[in-house]
């Protein structure tokens, strides 16, 4: 379910923070009228957008790419009319050291930034989905990062939580300083996001949420990829699959 079809506002939680699911198993929406009563650690991207080096993690199926694409477009819009630039690259698109470096670090806009005085926000997506192994990608990135002027570079990289490498995180801290590096994890969906997704499918959202609750399927509903599964199996105010089958199918989606 590509969440660019929706107006979802996604939130990020510090790795050491607490993801608050007290809204009946859904993420407590920090922007809701009662959200400020909860001490939620989750924040919108604009809150952390000025941190020089950001590691953006997430479980499988959480929508990391879509969420960071939204962040990229936010920053690009902010820079409109200024000398500052914003670049997006998907690490999974390259099958050799040379191809990756030519595409990213030899990019015309990137090279102009290196020679100039402006700022660059560099988004590198999907470290864990590369045609190259994570080990090779980490080695390339560590080598290239060492040569870059970090005072004008805002570095953002996404990765599946379980696949993130401590050695690359340490390299970022060595380059930018520990205080300028932050690790955030993409939080699950809010109740309002699930309501919107149901409405877009012309499904009565109240009935859908009730059936999700009846099947104890909220852990599936708060992840975009398994929410798509639930919406696809919902017919005549109930799921066409049993609870056991829903979870089995959900696990397959997350593999």
Image (tube, helix red, strand yellow):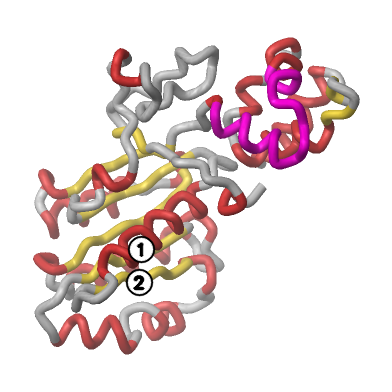
Instruction: Please state which of residues 221 and 168 is positioned toward the viewer in this rendering.
Output: 221
Q: Which residue is mark 2?
A: 87
In the rendered view, tell whether residue 54 sits above or below residue 245.
Answer: below
Assign the C terminus to one quadrant of the image: top right
Are the residues at dot 1 and dot 2 in contact (C-beta closer than 8 Å)?
Answer: yes
The region drawn magenta spans: 192-209
Residue 227 location, x and y as percent?
Answer: 67, 34
Residue 105 among magenta residues: no
In the rendered view, tell whether residue 4 sits above or below residue 184.
Answer: below
Q: Which mark is residue 123?
A: 1
Q: Residues within 10 Å of mark 1 (few under 14, many from 20)?
A: many
Q: CA distance from mark 1 to mark 2?
A: 6 Å
Q: Main secondary structure of the magenta part?
A: helix
Residue 65 location, x and y as percent?
Answer: 50, 54
Residue 198 among magenta residues: yes
Residue lying at 47% horizontally and 45% vertically, measured from the top left: 160
In the rendered view, tell whether residue 71 sits above or below residue 20.
Answer: below
Horizontally, residue 157 falls left or right of residue 95, namely left
């Amino acid at each position: 379910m590509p969440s660019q079809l929706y107006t979802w506002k996604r939130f990020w939680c510090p790795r050491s923070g607490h993801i608050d699911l007290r809204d009946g198993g859904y993420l407590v929406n920090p922007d809701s009228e009662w959200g400020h009563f909860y001490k939620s650690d989750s924040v919108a991207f604009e809150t952390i957008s000025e941190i020089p080096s950001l590691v953006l993690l997430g479980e499988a199926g959480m929508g990391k790419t879509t969420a960071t694409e939204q962040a990229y477009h936010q920053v690009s819009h902010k820079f409109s009319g200024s000398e500052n630039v914003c670049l997006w690259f998907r690490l999974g698109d390259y099958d050799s050291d040379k191809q990756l470096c030519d595409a990213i670090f030899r990019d015309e806009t990137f090279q102009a930034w290196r020679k100039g005085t402006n700022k660059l926000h560099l988004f590198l997506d999907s470290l864990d989905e590369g045609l190259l192994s994570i080990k090779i990608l980490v080695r390339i990135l560590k080598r290239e990062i060492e040569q870059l002027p970090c005072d004008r570079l805002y570095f953002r990289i996404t990765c599946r939580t379980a696949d993130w490498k401590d050695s690359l995180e340490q390299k970022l801290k060595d380059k930018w300083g520990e205080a300028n590096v932050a690790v955030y994890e993409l939080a699950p969906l809010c109740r309002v996001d699930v309501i919107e997704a149901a409405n877009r499918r012309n499904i009565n959202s109240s009935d859908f949420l009730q059936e999700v609750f009846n099947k104890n399927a909220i852990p599936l509903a708060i992840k975009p990829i398994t929410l798509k599964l639930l919406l696809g199996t919902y017919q005549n105010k109930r799921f066409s699959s049993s609870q056991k089958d829903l979870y089995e199918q959900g696990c397959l989606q997350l593999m």
